[in-house]
Amino acid sequence: MNRKILIIEDDGRIANFMTMALKAKGYTVLLAQNGRQGILSFCTENPEVVLLDLGLPDMDGVEIINQIREVSEIPIIVVSAREQDNDKISALDAGANDYVTKPFSMGEMLARIRVMERLLERENNGTNEGVYKIDYLTVDSEKHRVYVGEEEVHLTPIEFKLLLLLVSNRGKVITHSQISKKVWGYGETGDSKSIRVFMAGLRRKIERDSSNPRFIFTEIGVGYRFADE
């Protein structure tokens, strides 16, 4: 599918580099050099994925995420030189789907975009509910059953909620704060120590080798991500 991607980036060299690489892969590319142009293009051109720099000349990228999230769940990948965990957490908590730090390889960027495309396809096909099967793991959200291979494993209610949150957002980084709010119903900053304990228990039950995880990956200082495939 020839998807339309909106790049909001004020660095001309980076913008041109991404534009050429994306067009070579068959994408339609829209380019905005500041936040206001980006929001206008989002509103008028109906892109399917947004690649967003945070350090724009007229407004902070997190504000753009907030404005977009008021009206749309479009996949947003932040592309930023900011490497601090707090910057990543702020963008992800605001609703970004992923965060790529500059400098980056275009191969990595294309892989991140493909993850977002699979997310769009699942939404369009109505496959976000029911039974999730990834490699040797099967999660039945309606029957509250989990299988590793052919063997059913018992999860506590908290572990099951954690797993379902991760699986239903597979490929997306979920911050400690988001996990705390979704699973426990509270927490602005997220109790990372408690979450880490529960994640360790969950890994022991669903991973064949918890020291070399197949499914649950730690984004250090930020949160967790479930394998997309």
Image (spheres, grey):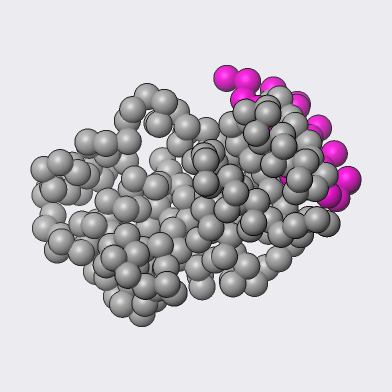
Instruction: Say left or right for 46 vs 180.
Output: right
Closer to us: 63 or 169:
63
Q: Residue at x 75, y 26 (%)?
A: 24
Query: Going by the picture, which residue comes out furthest to the bottom?
Result: 193
Q: Vertical placement of 152 versus 90: above or below?
A: above
Which quarter of the image is occupied by the N terminus? top right
Choose top left, top right, bottom left or bottom right for residue 198: bottom left
User: Magenta includes 25?
Assistant: yes
The structure residue drawn at horizontal position 26% and vertical position 43%, both measured from the top left corner, is 136
Query: Camera-side residue: 16 or 21?
Result: 16
x 60%, y 36%: residue: 49
Q: Residue furthest top?
A: 1
Q: Look at the image and say whether residue 158 sits in the magenta stretch.
A: no
Q: Which residues are magenta?
A: 1-26
| Residue 141 screen position, x and y as percent | 19, 44
Residue at left offset 32%, top offset 60%: 182
Query: Going by the image, does 14 lie left or right of 214?
Result: right
Q: Is residue 214 left or right of residue 142?
A: right
Residue 121 falls in image quadrant: top left
Considering the image in quadrants, where does the C terminus appear? top left
| On screen, residue 15 above or below 92 | above
